[in-house]
Amino acid sequence: MKNIHEELERFQKEKGWEISTENAGQSRESLLLNHMLLTTEIAEIAEELRKMMNLEYELIHEGMEKEEAFRLAKQEISEDIGKEIADSIAYLCKFATFFERNIEEDMMNKLQEINNRMKPNLQKRMKEEAK
């Protein structure tokens, strides 16, 4: 993840696409614009999922078995959804760069946080099941 983030940061600077750090006003405007662009990319992921589900429904309606219809519909949108995921990651990396965050470290910390949160629930469930 670190390598991808560094490559995206270099690419964005080269193109002049990074979030502005000139002053508070420009940073605020740039943050809002990039947030809007990120939500657009997320919506495009949703659109690809909608296409997949519609195609799956059509194939089933035409008589195809459900599993095969799902597999074909998934395959049909795979490349396009990959592009939208990549676009979304690029915008998320812009935010991480602006806020001087280490994405890899933040992800590992988040996973540990979730793990720690789940342990008490698991222990509680095990005690209840033992009763």
Image (spheres, rainbow, N blue to C red):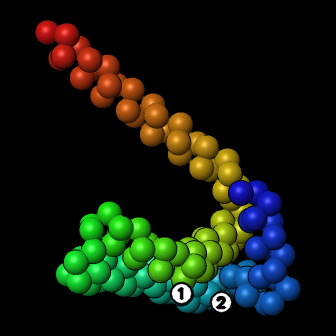
Badge 2 crowding class, 10 Å Cα cut-off, few under 14, some 14 to 19, many 20 or more, is few
Which residue sits furthest left? 131
Residue 40 appears at what percent x and percent y?
A: 47, 86
* Label 1 sits on residue: 37
Callout 1 touching callout 2 (CB < 8 Å): no
Return the x and y of residue 131 as percentages of the image width and height: 14, 9
Q: Which amino acid, by three-letter code, is at mark 2? A: Gln
Please say whether residue 31 is visible from this viewpoint: no
Residue at left 24%, top 23%?
A: 125
Location of residue 33 with respect to 109 vertically, above or below: below
Question: In the image, residue 38 lies at what x, y percent?
Answer: 53, 81
Q: Earlier in the sequence, mark 1 or mark 2?
A: 2
**In which quadrant of the rendered view does residue 96 lie?**
bottom right
Distance Cα–Cα, label 1 vs label 2:
16 Å
Would you identify the image quadrant in which residue 87 lies?
bottom right
Q: Residues within 10 Å of mark 1 (few under 14, many from 20)?
A: some
Q: Which residue is mark 2?
A: 26
Q: Position of residue 106 (x, y in %)?
A: 62, 50
Residue type at mark 1 is Leu
Which structural element holds mark 2? helix
Above or below, 101 relative to 93: above
